[in-house]
Amino acid sequence: MPVRSVLMSGPPGVGKTMTAGWLAQQLDLPLYTLDLASVMSSFLGKTGANVRSVLNHAQERPCVLLLDEFDSIAKRRDDDTDVGELKRLVTVILQTIDDWTPTSLLVAATNHGELLDPAVWRRFDVTLQFEMPAREQRLALLGSRDVIGPVAEAVAAVTEGLPLSALSRAVDAARKQALLEERGFEEALISWAASAAHQAAGPARTAAKGRRDLDVYLHHCRGLSARDIAELVGTSHMTVVRILKRLKGEVDAGA
């Protein structure tokens, strides 16, 4: 029997919506996204009718239906803070998942899987847990965006704990900044990474080394000598020279 429903859980920006789009593309089906906030109603009984209407419509013709922010309507039924209407809505969702047509794919996405009713997890054919990207994944993204090796490694070292969407936006912003301010793209990207380094959740030793390398390169871009940079970052002159040879040399080679 074909997979009819998929539940994706994970923090914001890890690719849940993108995955729904990829599934629709692979299946050659249109992607419909339901804004759950638009069907919520303060009128008793109206929300369930709205959701049921949308779900029924999506089963009339083959498609991929994405229910984003799924936790807003499929909360645990033992949550005493919710009114009876939302608890009844969970029942509507469960019944619909059970009866979902095999000609369409139902995809639900949530940033807060812990809020979902346990019965919801059991109803989906496939459940996927998305994690924050590992260093290798961050390097792969930077490489796909034409960020050269040593610079990509330095940026990846200090961006653990950040989603790929944030990293991708940073690359785009750095390219725009480089054009508008007539500065090097690598300098703009490293400047962003240095300011974002405090968010790093990775191993302290790796993150510290990455921050040091970024600081060295930024000071070099601002015209400081290797000896001055060594004094500022608290390392040896030869270490600064090696860092610049590794980073700046590759940048010049790729220019």
Image (spheres, grey):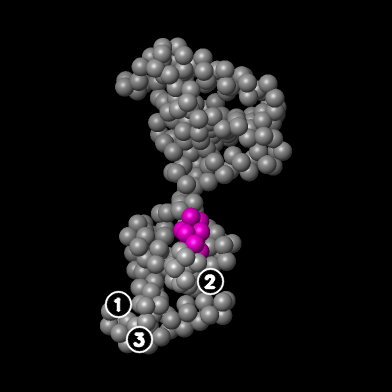
Residue ID for mark 2: 149
> Which residue lies at the image location 42% right of the left edge and 80% below the top edge?
243
Does 170 lie within the magenta span? yes
Q: Is residue 23 left or right of residue 174?
A: right
Magenta segment, prevailing SS (helix, strand or loop): helix
Mark 2 packing: few (<14 Cα in 10 Å), some, or many (20+)?
A: some
Q: Nearer the viewer, residue 255 or 66?
A: 255
Residue ID for mark 1: 233
Label 2 element class: helix
Label 1 element class: helix
> Which residue lies at the image location 46% right of the left edge and 42% below the top edge?
10
Mark toward the start of the polypeptide (1 vs 2): 2
Residues at circles 1 and 2 in contact by the CB criterion of under 8 Å? no
Q: Nearer the viewer, residue 82 or 194?
A: 194
Query: Residue 32: x percent and y percent?
Result: 60, 32
Residues at circles 1 and 3 in contact by the CB criterion of under 8 Å? no
Query: Residue 134: x percent and y percent?
Result: 48, 57
Query: Residue 74: x percent and y percent?
Result: 45, 25
Mark 1 packing: few (<14 Cα in 10 Å), some, or many (20+)?
A: some
> As shown in the figure, which amino acid type bears the numbered disc 2?
Gly
Q: Which residues are magenta?
A: 168-176
Query: Is residue 134 among what the camera can see?
Result: no
